Image: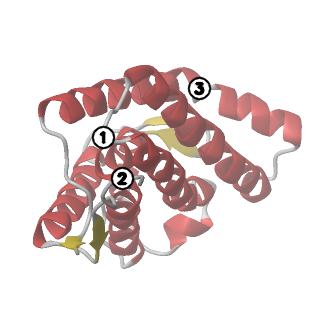
Amino acid sequence: MTVSPPPAPRYRGLATRDLALIALFAALLAAMSLVPGIPVGSVPITLQTLVVVLAPSILGAKRGVLAVVTFLALAAAGLPILSGGAGGLASFAGASGGFLVSWIFVALFIGLLTDRMLPKYRFWRGLVINLAGGIVVCYLIGGPWMALVAGLDLTAALVALAAFVPGDVVKVVVATLIATSVHRAYPVPPAGNRVA
């Protein structure tokens, strides 16, 4: 007779710890707006994208997406927590609006793949996931939006995006290094309350 292994523990809902982590990363996103962005055309280079990659790399999909959505909801409500002290719905209608919206999908992409990798977070695998999410997914959504709002053709939009690549690669590497260190030193428990 074959003995089957015990089922993996399941988690449901959000624990108080999860709410605190979501609020912490939403606040960290807001704090990064205090660091002045580097204006490149109509879209600034900011450190907020570092946190957008970091949150799901540490927290996973559920909490990472909720941290980003919380931040974006507060920004849409008018809090001046976007780069340069911007806030309100008008920020989402501008050239950088597509990048802001893309953050939800970036967090979802990175978080889902990170969840599959845990509990053994590895730097190189995390880096590939974070590069794909933090650059490819972000640019696939934000680039066309920027081109449409700014009235750029495809070539001009690609040239404009090229200015962001070096800084975004550095931010992704830094976020991956931080996530690797956090998972090694203090593995973050799964989201939710354990159910039998």
Q: Earlier in the sequence, mark 1 or mark 2?
A: 2
Q: Amino acid at mark 2?
A: Gly
Q: Nearer the viewer, mark 1 or mark 2?
A: 1
Residue 98 as seen in the image, left or right of residue 17 = right
Question: Residue 194, image x and y in percent?
Answer: 20, 70
The residue that disc 1 covers is 119
Dot 1 alpha-carbon crowd within 10 angstroms: few under 14, some 14 to 19, many 20 or more: some
Question: Residue 53, image x and y in percent?
Answer: 41, 42
Q: Earlier in the sequence, mark 3 or mark 1?
A: 1
Q: CA distance from mark 2 to mark 3?
A: 24 Å
Q: Nearer the viewer, mark 2 or mark 3?
A: 2
Looking at the rendered structure, the secondary structure element under dot 1 is: loop
**Mark 1 near mark 2, Cβ–Cβ under 8 Å?**
no
Q: Quadrant of residue 170?
A: top left
Q: CA distance from mark 1 to mark 2?
A: 11 Å
**Picture residue at 27% right of the left edge, 39% below the top:** 35
Looking at the rendered structure, the secondary structure element under dot 3 is: helix
Q: Quadrant of residue 131?
A: top right
Q: Amino acid at mark 3?
A: Val
Dot 2 alpha-carbon crowd within 10 angstroms: few under 14, some 14 to 19, many 20 or more: many
Question: Residue 39, image x and y in percent?
Answer: 50, 36
Dot 3 alpha-carbon crowd within 10 angstroms: few under 14, some 14 to 19, many 20 or more: few
The residue that disc 3 covers is 165
- Residue 29's disc is none
Colour scheme of the rendered structure: secondary structure
The residue that disc 2 covers is 60
Whether residue 167 is visible: no
Q: Amino acid at mark 1?
A: Pro
**Picture residue at 43% right of the left edge, 44% below the top:** 114
Looking at the rendered structure, the secondary structure element under dot 2 is: helix
Whether residue 84 is visible: yes
